[in-house]
Amino acid sequence: MFRIQTMNTISAKGLELFSRERYEVACDLPNPDAILVRSGDLHGLSLPSSLKAIARAGAGYNNIPVKECSTQGIVVFNTPGANANAVKELVLASLLLSSRGISDGIQWALSIANQADQVPDIVEKEKTRFAGPEIKGKTLGIVGLGAIGVMVANDAIALGMNVIGYDPYISVEAAWNLSRQVIRADSLEGLLSKADYTTLHVPLSAHTKGFFDAEKLRLMKRGARLLNFARGGLVNEGELIEALNTNLLSCYVTDFPSAELLGCPKVICIPHLGASTPEAEENCALMAVQQLIGFLEEGSIRNSVNFPVCRLDRNGAFRIVIINRNIPNMVGQITTILASAGINIVNMINQSRDEYAYNIIDTEQKIPESSMRFLRAVDGIIRIRLLE
């Protein structure tokens, strides 16, 4: 029986996928086989030797010590795209918020609540203060065409916007789902110079941290509006505020407030609501649980942040999965040990990612414990599991 430890509250629809015959699920379990987590911080926690996988019910994984997990052969999963529709809807709402003075108008309207019968006349007199352009016919630039970026692009087209997309690393799946009406930008600079609105949908990394700086802001159309529902660290906040104060930009909408941004009148700060819908929480939980089940029962890896995508249709009575360092002659050593024990390999796959590799091997015979000991002794092998 597999033991699953939950951290935070996980949607019941996801947890229902764990069969009671094969899984024990609880928030406080010793020696778990896997951890299912949302926002709980795992940094600093002692990871038990029994732990084989961690699934994050969400896209971000800053709360998980990925490097430490990798060295111990613990596969870390996330759920990219599971909350894409929730984020997309908030982006579309924010296009309107950035244009029409809606937020300021609502706050102003609340301030005149004590004016009694004069309210209608005051509203008619002052409403022009909050006027703004329609988004139909305007140009939206989308930086990053992953699951969310593609959805935003397609729906913006349906709303009558002209859409330009930039993503030099767009996946085949994303390209298939993208509307043909989306114009491909050859460069980020070209997109910024044409867009009335720009929305960011790229991951935060050492290469992208603060990449949207004064240089990028100067390339944008004067009076353009910038939306960031990816990660706050993508934008240099000090240089952004300077661009807003000098009217280079009209508005910045973000899902990642900071004290500095909250003090700027041209910034609309949303309190990290991108994935805060019951549907998104269910989708993330379902996807995370499905990935854990596939890994624990079949050894399949999908949407891991530290190991390669790897799956193989079951083709033998027994299956062994091996995690090793990505160094020469590992496959040769593994197959030699199995062959010396008279083990016939029916099918196998080896995939690598950066420093690590993953193997799924189907055999006709059960691998004897003596061969398992030889495999564990091979320099570079991190973890082995035998699945029957």
Image (spheres, grey):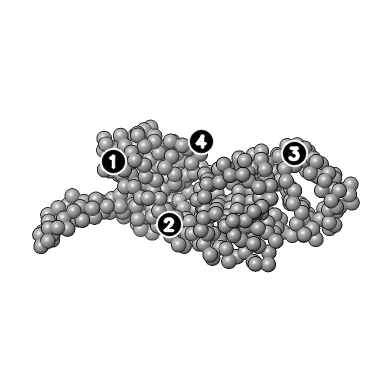
Query: Is residue 350 visible to us here?
Result: no
Query: Is residue 117 visible to us here?
Result: yes
Camera-side residue of 378 and 159: 378
The 10 Å Cα crowd at callout 1, few under 14, some 14 to 19, many 20 or more, is some
Where residue 233 sits, quadrant-wise, is: top left
Residue 199 position in % (x across, y down): 39, 46
Question: Disc 4 marks which amino acid?
Answer: Ala
Q: Secondary structure at mark 1?
A: loop
In the picture of the structure, the residue carrying the numbered disc 4 is: 206
In the picture of the structure, the residue carrying the numbered disc 1 is: 264
Cα distance in 3D space between marks 3 and 4: 28 Å
The 10 Å Cα crowd at callout 3, few under 14, some 14 to 19, many 20 or more, is some
Q: Residue at x 64, y 53 (%)?
A: 30
Question: Disc 1 marks which amino acid?
Answer: Cys
Residue 116 lies left or right of residue 365; in this view the side is left
In the picture of the structure, the residue carrying the numbered disc 2 is: 276
Cα distance in 3D space between marks 2 and 1: 25 Å
Mark closer to the observer (3, 4):
3
Residue 78 position in % (x across, y down): 56, 51
Question: Disc 2 marks which amino acid?
Answer: Ser
Camera-side residue of 338 and 136: 338
Mark closer to the observer (2, 4):
2
- For the residues bearing labels 3 and 4, Cβ distance under 8 angstroms: no
Cα distance in 3D space between marks 3 and 1: 53 Å
The 10 Å Cα crowd at callout 4, few under 14, some 14 to 19, many 20 or more, is few
